Image (cartoon, rainbow, N blue to C red):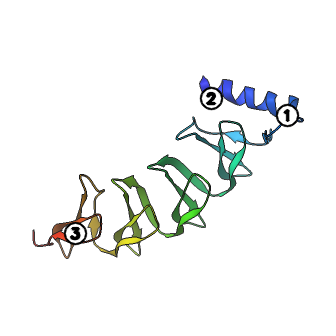
Amino acid sequence: MKKIILSIAMLLIGTMASNAQNLEVTPSYRILSDFSDGLAVVAENDKYGFINKQGKVVVPCIYDRTEDFQEGMARVHKNWKCGFIDKQGNEVIPCIYDDAEDFHDGMARVQKNWKYGFVDNQGKVVVPCICDNAEDSHEGMARVEKNGKCGFVDKQGNEVIPCNF
């Protein structure tokens, strides 16, 4: 119900307030989500972006798919690849990964060529995509698997518990 009311309000504001200051609502946008971290997903011509609570486009509709913000970053998809943007729309982690998961504990699990690794929210590769499997980070450590054996890495990429188990 909130989405319908918000959509109607945005369309009315967009058509009636063309002279309003600092308002960039375009009726051609479809609003697809509730606000998350102050931004909502919008779509135009089968591409996705974000608007802020004032209706201003913060991230233009250039992505094939977007996810909600987690820990200040949103997972985006472009040309069949995944990456992450910040709330200003900067592509902090370029869309070069085959798959990615949301940020947990300051790291996001990424996949490239069927191997897993981790990146941090500054765009640094913490663990290169060399693991056969990996789980999201919790309590500062993430479980990784190499050659059928499991271990744990910390947020700096150090193998705290070697893959011997």
Amino acid residing under circle 3: Glu
- At 74% from the left edge and 26% from the top edge, which residue is drawn? 9
In the picture shown, does residue 70 fall above or below 31?
Answer: below
How far, Cα to Cα, is label 1 from label 3? 56 Å
Residue 104: image x %, image y %? 35, 52
Q: Viewed as shown, does residue 116 lie left or right of 34?
A: left
- At 40% from the left edge and 54% from the top edge, which residue is drawn? 103
In the picture shown, does residue 43 fall above or below 134?
Answer: above
Mark carried by residue 145: 3
- At 28% from the left edge and 73% from the top edge, which residue is drawn? 131
In the picture shown, does residue 115 fall above or below 66?
Answer: below
How far, Cα to Cα, is label 2 from label 1? 23 Å
Q: Which residue is mark 1?
A: 20
Q: Viewed as shown, does residue 51 lie left or right of 92?
A: right
Amino acid residing under circle 1: Ala
Residue 164: image x %, image y %? 10, 73
> Of marks 2 and 3, which one's residue comes earlier in the chain?
2
- At 44% from the left edge and 49% from the top edge, which residue is drawn? 71
> Of marks 2 and 1, which one's residue comes earlier in the chain?
2
Mark carried by residue 3: 2
Q: Residue furthest left?
A: 165
Question: Helix, strand, or loop for circle 3?
Answer: strand
- Alpha-carbon neighbours of circle 1 within 10 Å: few (<14), some, or many (≥20)? few
Question: Helix, strand, or loop for circle 2?
Answer: helix
How far, Cα to Cα, is label 2 from label 3? 42 Å
In the picture shown, does residue 41 fall above or below 9?
Answer: below
> Of marks 1 and 3, which one's residue comes earlier in the chain?
1
Foreground mark, 2 or 1, reads 1
Residue 49: image x %, image y %? 65, 51
Contact flag, marks 1 and 3 (Cβ < 8 Å): no
